[in-house]
Image (cartoon, rainbow, N blue to C red):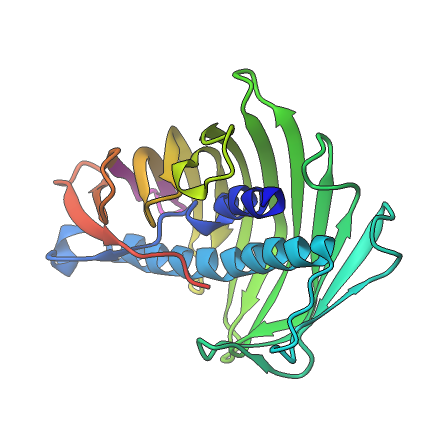
């Protein structure tokens, strides 16, 4: 149970950090086209690297427990050394094609080097991708997860960074991605019950989209994510583009809903609807 709670906390660092969104009830003239283009591709980037984080934590959770699912042919999980030896390396191998129940096909390997049990302060996981593809997209990058121990308020705290993130699409176009975020669990620390967990997220990300437009995203008011809600419930982030275009995204007052307010430069705010993260 404890490992599963650790996995939920760590996956949040990528799962909803960039607030995947889509435009609703607004015209192309009401917001910058370049802003909308970057927003769409930021959402896609988020989903792909969220998928890596989700699989890393899910598969580590199972591997530390020594679980085997005889109903699944793939992926396979292999420790370099005996379970319980540290440091150790876990290889998650999807082979040439591993299609899950949702119809998502992955291939290649996710390789995770772990320094210690994840619940121990100072424990790290370094994830690298070996010829890794998802539905024809080639994904590269190094993800580093660190258990910071208790924060200044005594809450569990974790840091995740992604360096060298690149998504290469089947047409040869690319997105790039770098990020660093810190997650603190601010509620639900004293129970094994998942639905009372609440996380506070800070940090930022940067990258470029297929058209070479670069962006910088910064969380200006800490984001709050409740385990019982699929969307971020409050907090503000800013996204600034290389052409000088900027926007802010306000996630609301803590109510569990899909609504967020997008403000682009000095233009009138626009209501948008949020997606769940892609897996």
Q: Residue 198 vs residue 155: left or right?
A: left
The percent coordinates of residue 257 (x first, y second) are: 22, 46
Residue sitting at 72 percent across and 49 percent down?
126
In the displayed structure, 76 sits above or below 234; it is: below
Quadrant (top left, top right, bottom left, bottom right) of the N terminus: top right
Nearest to the observer: residue 95 or residue 167? 95
Query: Looking at the image, can residue 28 be seen?
Result: yes
User: Does the segment drawn in magenta span residue 153?
Assistant: no
The percent coordinates of residue 118 (x first, y second) are: 69, 41
In the displayed structure, 186 sits above or below 278; it is: above
Give the prevailing secondary structure in the magenta stretch: strand
In the displayed structure, 145 sits above or below 221; it is: below
The percent coordinates of residue 49 (x first, y second) are: 53, 57
In the displayed structure, 217 sits above or below 65; it is: above
Residue sitting at 71 percent across and 46 percent down?
125
Q: Residue 93 vs residue 175: left or right?
A: right
Residue sitting at 50 percent across and 62 percent down?
48
Query: Looking at the image, can residue 179 be seen?
Result: no
- Magenta segment, which residues? 239-251
The percent coordinates of residue 69 (x first, y second) are: 64, 71
User: Does the segment drawn in magenta span residue 246?
Assistant: yes
């Amino acid at each position: 149970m404890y490992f599963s709670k650790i996995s939920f906390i760590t996956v949040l660092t990528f799962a909803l950090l960039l607030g995947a969104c889509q435009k609703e009830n607004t015209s192309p003239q009401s917001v910058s086209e370049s802003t909308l283009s970057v927003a769409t591709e930021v959402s896609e980037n988020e989903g792909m690297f969220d998928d890596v984080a989700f699989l890393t934590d899910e598969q580590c959770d199972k591997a530390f427990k020594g679980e085997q699912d005889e109903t699944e042919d793939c992926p396979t999980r292999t420790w370099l050394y005996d379970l319980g030896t540290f440091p150790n390396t876990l290889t998650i191998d999807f082979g040439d094609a591993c299609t899950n129940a949702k119809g998502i096909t992955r291939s290649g390997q996710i390789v995770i080097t772990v320094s210690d049990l994840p619940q121990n302060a100072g424990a790290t996981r370094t994830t690298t991708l070996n010829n890794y593809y998802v539905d024809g997209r080639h994904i590269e990058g190094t993800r580093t997860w660190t258990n910071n121990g208790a924060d200044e308020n005594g809450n569990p705290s974790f840091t995740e960074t992604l360096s060298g993130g690149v998504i290469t699409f089947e047409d040869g176009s690319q997105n790039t991605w770098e990020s660093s975020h810190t997650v603190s669990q601010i509620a639900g620390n004293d129970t094994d019950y998942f639905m009372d967990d609440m996380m506070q997220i800070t940090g930022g990300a940067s990258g470029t989209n297929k058209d070479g437009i670069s962006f910088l995203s910064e969380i200006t008011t800490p984001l709050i994510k409740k385990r019982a809600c699929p969307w971020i419930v409050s907090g503000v982030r800013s996204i600034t583009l290389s052409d000088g275009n900027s926007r802010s995204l306000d996630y609301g007052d803590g109510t569990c809903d899909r609504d967020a307010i997008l403000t682009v430069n000095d233009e009138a705010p626009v209501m948008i609807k949020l997606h769940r993260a892609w897996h």
